[in-house]
Amino acid sequence: MPGKKLLFMGGEIGQRREWSEESEVNWWLLDAGPYHIGTQNWVRDLNAFYQREPALWRGDYESDGFWWVDCSDHGNSVLSFIRHDRESGHHVLAVLNLTPNPLRDYRVGVPLAGDWNEVLNSDAAIYGGGNVGNGGVVAAEDFSVQNQRYSVVLTLPPLGLVVFQAGAAGA
């Protein structure tokens, strides 16, 4: 990448051992197998999404820039939250399944009606995953849960993160 200085510590290429100043990063992992390449793709896509989506950074110091949808579902080990940018009106929903099993028909509250586009899924094949997901889009239903006016029914990948954008923001 001309003009940009890249710093690596090994995590972004799937290095198994912790970085140490006494040895170099395992550079050979850059081309090693689907999981190391998948990790690189995931870090690349996360960084690109973060840069282009103001809901992830613009509202950091505003009370409506972040809110938990549900941070107390101990039984399913699921966390969900919304990031919101007041200026653009964008909403981003992040849902984490912290179990090794996929969860199907999992209902999550959302603040807006309409389509929610699945923009990131850590279980996608491009990241070395099994492609457990939502087919790219879910429709919000007029069914209130978790203090939200609407809700979506999701398939959550095992040990995974899925990220959605509301409506045209995901296009």
Image: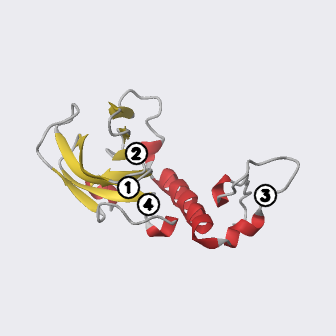
Residue at image coords 52%, 52%? 51
Which image quarter is the N terminus in? bottom right
Quick check: marks 1 and 4 in contact, CB under 8 Å? yes
Nearer the N terminus, badge 1 or badge 4? Answer: 4
Say which mark, if any, is on residue 51: none
Q: Which amino acid does label 1 sit on?
A: Pro
Coloured how?
Answer: secondary structure
- The residue singled out by tag 3 in the image is 25
- The residue singled out by tag 1 in the image is 157
CA–CA distance between discs 4 and 3? Answer: 26 Å
Q: Which amino acid does label 3 sit on?
A: Val
Quick check: marks 4 and 2 in contact, CB under 8 Å? no
Q: Can you tell which of label 3 and label 1 is closer to the viewer?
A: 1
Q: How crowded is mark 3: few (under 14 residues within 10 Å), some or many (20 or more)?
A: some
Q: Is residue 4 left or right of residue 140?
A: right
- The residue singled out by tag 4 in the image is 123
Nearer the N terminus, badge 4 or badge 2? Answer: 2
Q: How crowded is mark 4: few (under 14 residues within 10 Å), some or many (20 or more)?
A: many
Nearer the N terminus, badge 3 or badge 1? Answer: 3
CA–CA distance between discs 4 and 2? Answer: 11 Å
- The residue singled out by tag 2 in the image is 96
Question: SS class of the residue under badge 4?
Answer: loop
- Of residues 149 and 106, the one drawn nearer to the viewer in this rendering: 106
Residue 70 at x, y = what percent? Answer: 32, 34
- Of residues 13 and 163, the one drawn nearer to the viewer in this rendering: 13
